Amino acid sequence: MQILSVNVGDRRPVKVKQRNMQTGIYKTPAAGSVKVSRLGLKDDVRIEHRKMGLEHSAVYAYPYEHYAYWQTELKSERNSEEPFPLGQFGENLTVTGLLEKEVRIGDIFRFGNTILQVAHPRIPCGKLNARMGFRFAPMFLASCKVGYYMRVIKEGSVAKGDSIELLERDENSPTMEEFVRVTHYEYWDELALKKLLQARDLMPFWREMIESKIVRNQLASGWQGLREFEIVHRVQESEDTVSLDLKCVRGRALSPFHGGQQLMVALGERGGGSQKRKAFYLSSSPQTLSTYRIIVRHGIEDAQDCAVSSHLSTLKEGNHIRSNAPFGAVRSLPEKNLGEERIRVLISQGLGIAPILSILYEFEEIQPRVILFHESDTNEPQELLTEVNELVSRNSNFEMIRADSSKLEYITAEQICLHGALAQFDIDVAGSCEFIDRLVNEFMALDFAPAALMTRYVD
C-alpha cells in the first residue's frame, strides 16, 4: 500500500445546473512533502462541506486501480486515448492497495507520518460532472468505486512514495463498497441497513439518514426501491412464453403478496440513464416466499414493452434482474370456514392463467367455492396449466370448465350464468384486451355492473 501522488487544488469557478459556484475539485500533483493539518492539506483549496463538516472530509483518497477501469468505461464519452492525469477525480491522495471492497468505515491508517481515519465514502455532486465534462456522477456512484474521505487523527505530512500502514480495524464495520451499495441502491434491505449502524465512529449525518431509511422500510408495502434477483429456474412454457423463478441475491426473505399482483421489472444499468420498465404477473403461490415466479411473453407490439419482454425471455438461470415490490389491486378474501354463500368465479384466457394460478393458491388456504372458466388459445403456458389442473383436482371446492377456441368454443357470460345467480358471484377476469372487453360487454347486457368485475389485462 502506497501513496502514488499527493494532489492539491486551487479555487475555480464552475457552472452546475445553470448555477455559478466555486470548486476545488481541479487538483494536480504536488512536488515534495505536503503538510496535513486537522482540516486538510496545506495549500489545498477546500469548499465547505455543509452536511459533513470539513474535519470529517479533511483528506480524500482514491485508488489508482480504478483509473484503468474508467479509461475503458469512458472511452466513448471522452473520445480520447490519453490517460487520465493523477488527481483527475479530485482526490488529495492517489493510492494503491486500498480498494473500497477492503477499506472499512473507521479504519485507521498511517500515511507517511500522518495518521488518518476513514470517515465516509465520497458521494459525488454536479461538480464532478463539470470536472469530467459530462454527466458522470451517477455512473461514478453506481460503480461504488468512489474513494473515501478521512479525518486527521495525528497531523503530519505526506509525500509521493510514502508507505501506508493499517493500524486499527473493526471487522464488524462495513466496507466502503457495502456502505455505498446499501445506502444508495439496496436500501430495501433492513438487515443490511441495521448492520451499517454498527460502523465504527459513524458520523451523525449518516446515522440519521440510515435510521430514516429503516423507518421508511418498516412503513412500506413490500420494500423501497429496486431489489436484485437471480433467475434460479427457467421454463419454456410455449413458443413465445417463458416462466422465471426469482430469488433474492442477498438471500433475504421475500415480501408477502396476494394472488393477482405483479412485479415491475426494470432494465438498464444501475446509475445509467432512463430505464425501461414493464409489469409481469406473479404466478407462484403467495404461501411460498422462497422465490417469486413471473411469466413473460415476448414479441408484443409496444416498443418499450417488447424491449423488456424480449430481453427477459433470453435470460438464463444465473442471470440477474431488478424489480420493485409486488403491487396491484386485489379483492378482499373471504374469511376461512365461515360457510359464505358467495362464489368466487375466475375467468382466464391463454396467458391469463398466470395471475389466476396465484389466486387459486391463495384460495387453497381458505377454501371458498371456486369455479374456474378457462378459454385456451395458441401458445398458452402448458406447464402452468398442468399446475392448475393438479391444484383443482386436489381441492373439492374447486371446479374447472374449459373451452377450446381452436374448436370455436368460447367462454361467455351466459354460460357462466348457468352456474348460479350473478348476484352471488365475485368475478375476476384475466386475458387479452379483446377477451376481457367482450366479456365485460356481455355482462353489461345482463345488467351486471362492470365495476363488480376485477379485470387483469395480460398480453
Image (cartoon, rainbow, N blue to C red):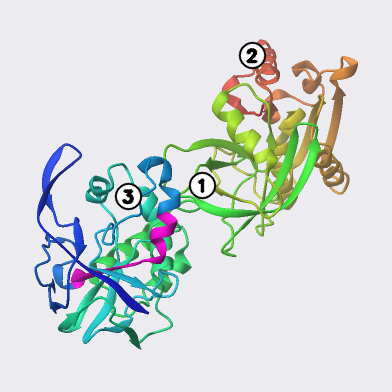
Q: Which residue is mark 3?
A: 137
Q: Mark 2 or 3, which is nearer the eye?
A: 3
Q: Which residue is mark 1?
A: 324
Q: Position of residue 359 (x, y in %)?
A: 69, 42
Q: Earlier in the sequence, mark 3 or mark 1?
A: 3
- The kind of residue on which mark 1 rests is Asn
Q: Mark 2 packing: few (<14 Cα in 10 Å), some, or many (20+)? A: few
- 198 or 214, nearer to the observer: 198
For residue 401, side relative to residue 149 (left or right): right
Q: Quadrant of residue 344?
A: top right
Q: Is residue 333 visible?
A: yes
- 5 or 247, nearer to the observer: 5
Q: Mark 2 or 1, which is nearer the eye?
A: 1
Q: Identify whether 115 is placed above or below 160.
A: below
Q: Identify whether 120 is placed above or below 81.
A: below
Q: Does residue 65 show up magenta in the picture?
A: yes
